[in-house]
Image (cartoon, grey):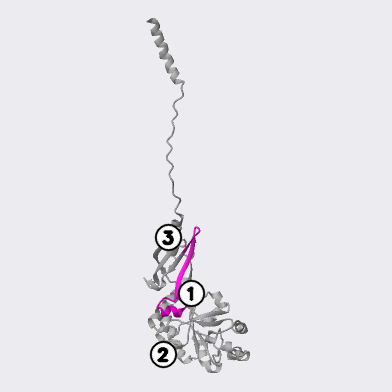
Amino acid sequence: MKYFRVLLCVLTVVLPLSCASRPPPVQTEAVPPVVDVPPPDKPGEAFKQALLHVKNNSPLVKKSFQLNEGSAAAAVEKNMPEIVVTGECQVDGYDFSVVYDLASAAKTGDNSFRIPFFLEESGGGFSRNDELFWSSVEDETGLLLSLDDDYQESWWRHFDLFEQYGARITFFVQGTQDVVAGFCDEALRRNHDIGFHSTNHYNLTKVSREVFDSETIEAAEDFRIACIPLSAFAWPYGFSEPWMQEALAPVFKITRGYGANYRLYDAETVRGGYIVSKAIDNIIYPDDGCFERSIRLLLLAAKFIGGVVPFTTHEIADTAQWGIKPQRLEYVLQTARELKLKFYTYRDFL
């Protein structure tokens, strides 16, 4: 019994020491299961940024226009807008395109507009119809308005209308300087501009070089001698060839063609020597409503995109095919003024 008690004491001492010498059990942390995390939505974020650029009318969105149905006449015939205004931008390597519905733009104030648009990612992944709020402000965008031929009596009667809207016009006179001198003096006195349109309005691509010189260079010299400054030359019927423009370059720094389609220019291009002006004659727009819708769109596009738009017509009369009704002319002047477009003359670009 004595020995049993001794053994029990020994075991009581040894067992704790034995347990203390063993390493503690290893505690392992639980590893969470692997979950697929989707990559950041880069196209979606880029689309959001592109949308902000468009709504803020950012200069990062490069605007332009294209003709609708190929020509003004085709668009007018189908009662469609003459042009479509578009824009492009790039965000984080993604390309976006926008179509502005300027034809449906609604005024929200004196100089403010709500403009619907459609934005689309070029890959087709994202798209959205929305609208932006835009205000027209004073800047260098403008209207380059000219009147052609020998309708001096008609033009003279509307000097007060031009003055009412602060409009400045370039009159491309046709004829000899002694016949048109009185009108030219009055137009210049009223801060308008005089250009030349030849003596007899021949198709200069069909005449001899001798007749060409007589109709242009020699006739222009008579105006210079009479102290009537001529800023530019408008080709009769809008027809010209490259050699003709070169021949007139020492006399006229700018020559002007004529056509039915819409064009926008910057100042440097106008100074470059040759531009084409859009016809706004009655024959192009047989319906008054169509005329007003088109003019509003075209002038609004000039202001929204930026640039100078040249318009040309002839006689100011209700019955003139190659001319403009007085109320249509006033609509052009009024709309240009409301949009804060500058009235340019060709002399402004010399």
Q: Quadrant of the N terminus?
A: top left
- Mark 1, secondary structure of its residue: loop
Asked if residue 134 shows in the view, the reply is: yes
Instruction: Kindly identify which numbered label has been placed on residue 164.
Output: none
Question: Camera-side residue: 140 or 60?
Answer: 60
Q: Quadrant of the C terminus?
A: bottom right
Nearer to us of marks 2 and 1 is 2
Asked if residue 165 is positioned above or below residue 177 in the image, the reply reads above
Residues under labels 2 and 1: Cα distance? Answer: 32 Å
Residue 87 located within the stretch drawn in magenta: yes
Residue name at image x 39 percent, y 65 percent:
130
User: Residue 231 lies in what quarter of the image?
Assistant: bottom right
User: Residue 331 lies in what quarter of the image?
Assistant: bottom left
Q: Residues within 10 Å of mark 3 (few under 14, many from 20)?
A: some
Q: Amino acid at mark 3?
A: Phe
Q: Which residue is mark 1?
A: 141
Q: Position of residue 40 (x, y in %)?
A: 45, 52
Q: Position of residue 76 (x, y in %)?
A: 42, 79
Q: Which residue is mark 3?
A: 126
Q: Position of residue 205 (x, y in %)?
A: 58, 87
- Mark 2, secondary structure of its residue: loop
Question: Camera-side residue: 134 or 225?
Answer: 134
Q: Which residue is mark 2?
A: 319
State which region is magenta. Answer: 67-96
Asked if residue 73 is positioned above or below residue 203 in the image, the reply reads above
Q: Tell which circle, 2 or 1, labels the residue nearer the N-terminal end.
A: 1
Asked if residue 61 shows in the view, the reply is: no
